[in-house]
Amino acid sequence: MDMDRAQLAHFLRRRREALVPADVGLTDGARRRTPGLRREEVAMLAGMSVDYVGRLEQQRATQPSEQMLNALVRALRLTLDERDHLYRLAGHNPPARIGATDHVHPTLLRILDRLHDTPAQVVDDLGTTLVQNPLAVALLGDDNRFEGLDRSLVHRWFTDPRARDVYPEQDHDHQSRVQVADLRAAVGRRGAQDQRARALVDSLLARSAEFRSLWEEHDVAVRRGEEKRIAHPQLGVIEVQCQILKVNDDSQWLLVFTATPGTESAGRLELLGVIGQGLLA
C-alpha cells in the first residue's frame, strides 16, 4: 500500500484545524490568527518534533511509522474510522478493531484531558497502559516505554522483579492475586480466539511458577476501585483510593488516584506536581 502524501497532508491539517485547545486539555492562551490547534501543540501532544509535523502537512515527510501514527491518533482525538483512514493514507493497514489496544476510547480521553491536578491513566483489560497524564507518570513511572508483551503490567509483574517496586513488599501477594483474577475475567470476555490474550497467558505460564499456581486456582474478579499503597521512590508510601471508570464493554478503564484530604498522603500527592513539572522540563 502506497503512502498518499497529498491526502495525508490535507487530512492532518483539517483535523488539526477542527480542534480547539479545550478539546485536548490545553488553555487557550494568546489570541489565535487561525482556527484550531497550532502545529507546536500537536507536536507536544504527539511527542514528536514540530519539524516533522510540518513536513507531514507539507508533503515532504518520509512514511510515518505505526508508532507515530498512534501518537497522532491520540493527539488529534481521532475516531476509529478516522484512525483507519489515517493508516491507509500513510500506507499502512489499519490495526484490527477486535482486541485492539492502541485506540483510547474518546470518552475516557476527554475526561483524562480535564484531570490536571490528579494522577490518572487509561489502561486496557490486559493491563496495558494506553495513556497517562504527567502526574500519573510522576506517581507510577512512564509505562509507555515498554514494548511487546511487557506493555502489560501483568506480564511485567510476574517476569520483571522491578515492576513490583511500585507497591510495598507486604502488598505483593494481594496484587498478584488481584491481577490474575482480573486477567481471568478479561480472557473470558475476549474469548479463546483473542491472540493477544492467549500470547500473554502462554508467556506467563511458561515463565512464572507463581502465575501458574494462581492461574490454576481459577479465581475470577473485576476490580471496581480499591485502596492502594504506592511506594514512591522519592516521597515514600502514599495511600490512595483508585477510582475506576470503564467503557461499556470493560475493555478500557480510566484509573483516577486520589487521597483523603488533610492526610499526609494528600500532601505527598500535591508534591507530585513539582516532580511532574521536572519530568516535562
Image (cartoon, grey):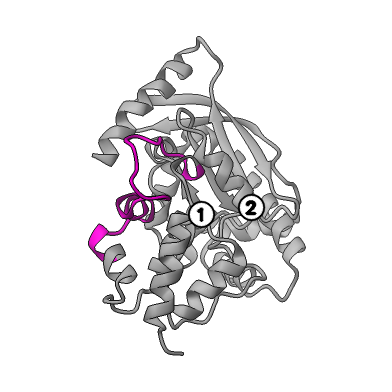
Reading the image, the residue beneath label 1 is 130
**Residue furthest out toward the front:** 33
| Callout 1 crowding tier (Cα within 10 Å): few <14, some 14–19, many ≥20 | many
- Mark 2 belongs to which amino acid? Gln
Q: Nearer the viewer, residue 17 or 93?
A: 17
Q: Nearer the viewer, residue 140 or 36?
A: 36
In the rendering, at what x and y percent does residue 184 appear?
71, 57
Q: Nearer the viewer, residue 200 or 247?
A: 247
Query: Residue, x 45% and y 27% (percent of image)?
Result: 117
In the rendering, at what x and y percent does residue 216 appear?
71, 59
Q: Is residue 173 visible?
A: no
Query: Residue, x 53% and y 41% (percent of image)?
Result: 112
Question: Splitting the image into 4 quarters, where does residue 227 fall?
Answer: top right
**Residue furthest out toward the bottom:** 1
- Mark 1 belongs to which amino acid? Leu
Badge 2 marks a residue whose secondary structure is strand
Mark 1 and mark 2 residues within 8 Å of each other at the beta carbon: yes
Query: Residue, x 65% and y 67% (percent of image)?
Result: 99
Q: What is the span of residues highlighted in magenta in the rendered image?
A: 23-52
128 in magenta: no
Reading the image, the residue beneath label 2 is 252
Residue 95 higher or lower than 163, as above or below: below
Badge 1 or badge 2: first in the primary sequence: 1
